[in-house]
Image (spheres, helix red, strand yellow):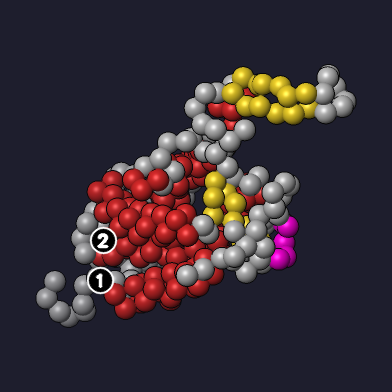
Amino acid sequence: MTYTQLAVLGVVVVAVVDLFVLRTRLLSRKVFWVSYAIIVFFQLVSNAVLTGLRIVRYNGEFIVGSSTPEFGAPPFIGDGRIAFAPFEDLLFGFALVLLTLSLWVFWGRVGVQRLPAAGPPRFLPPRNRDSEPPS
Amino acid sequence: MGFLGDGHADFRCEGGLGRTGTYRAVTVYYVSNFGYLAVLAFCFIGTLWLEFVFRTRVYRRWLRLLMTLVPVVIVFSLWDLYAIASGHWTFDLTAITGVFTVGNLPLDELLFFIVIPCCAILTLEAVRSVRGWRVGDEAEPPVEGGVS
C-alpha cells in the first residue's frame, strides 16, 4: 500500500476506535478540536524542520507529490506538500494524536488514575472548590 | 559521507577558499547526529511547562500515561517498520543517532512515538485546565432524586 492509502486508512480506523470501539467520542467534543488546532500548528513547525532539512526523505512512488529532492529542500507548499512535508503526514499525525487521546480518556473513564484531575492553572482561581479535591 | 560510527565526514571543496580537493572533517559528523533528537527535545521541553503552570498532572499519572503509550508505540512502530521496509521514507544517517531498535527502527523514531503523544495529552489537559470543558472521563454527576 502507498503512504497515501495507509494514511487515509489510519484516520478511518482510529476514528472508528474513538467513536465505536472505545466510545470516547472525542471527535464530537470541542475540547478535542481546540487541542488539535494547537497541536497541528506545532506539528507543522517541527515537521517542517524534519522534512525541510531532509532529515526524513520521502519516495514519490508512495505519496501524491514527488520524492524529496537529492539536494535542497522540497517545495514549501504545493506538489502534495504543506510546510515541506507530504500532506499525508497530517493524516498520520491526526491518527497518532486521536488514538493517543482516545486511549488516555478511555483509561481515565474506566478508573485508571482519573484523579488527580487537571487544573486549575496557577494563574486562575479554582473553578469550583466543592468539586475539586485539594491537591 | 554516509557511513556511521567513525566520527569523520569527507567533503569536497572546489574553488573559492582553499585548494580544490577532498577534505576530511573530524567530529562534524557527530554534531549533526542530533538533528532529529533536537526536534524531539524542542517538543518535549516546549510542552513540559504545561505540567506545572496548567497543573495538567499528566506525568504525575504515569501509569495511565504508560497504558496509553504502550499500544500507541506498538501500532505506530509497526506502521513505521512497514513504511521503511516498503521504501516509503528514509532517513538522513547524519541527522539521526544511528541507534536502531527492534526491526531496524531508528531510536529517534521510537522516541517520536513517545514524545509526541505526551505533547498531545499535555495539550488536551491544558485546554481542559483553562476552559473546564468535558473530555469524557469525568465522574458521572449524581442523578437527581436517585440513590447516591
Mark 1 highlights which residue?
A: B141
Q: Is residue B42 above or below residue B74?
A: above
Residue B60 % position (x, y): 30, 44
Which residue corresponds to the image point at 78% horizontal and 23% vertical from the top-left?
Answer: B21
Q: Secondary structure at mark 1?
A: loop
Q: Is residue B19 left or right of residue A89?
A: right
Nearer to us in this view, B41 or B76: B76
Specify whether residue A117 is in view: no
Residue B78 % position (x, y): 37, 57
Q: Is residue B36 above or below residue B127?
A: above
Q: Residue furthest left?
A: B147
Mark 2 highlights which residue?
A: A107
Query: Where is residue B9, by image quadrant?
Result: top right
- Which secondary structure class fits the magenta region best? loop
Residue A77 % position (x, y): 72, 61
The mark lying in front, picked from 1 and 2, is 2
* Distance (Cα) linking label 1 and label 2: 19 Å
User: Which quadrant does the N terminus of chain B fall into?
Assistant: top right
Question: Start and end of the magenta stretch?
Answer: A75-79
Q: Which mark is residue B68?
A: none
What chain does badge 2 belong to?
A
As shown in the figure, which amino acid type bears the numbered disc 2?
A: Trp
User: Which quadrant does the C terminus of chain B fall into?
Assistant: bottom left
Q: Secondary structure at mark 2?
A: helix
Specify whether residue B142 is in view: yes
What chain does badge 1 belong to?
B
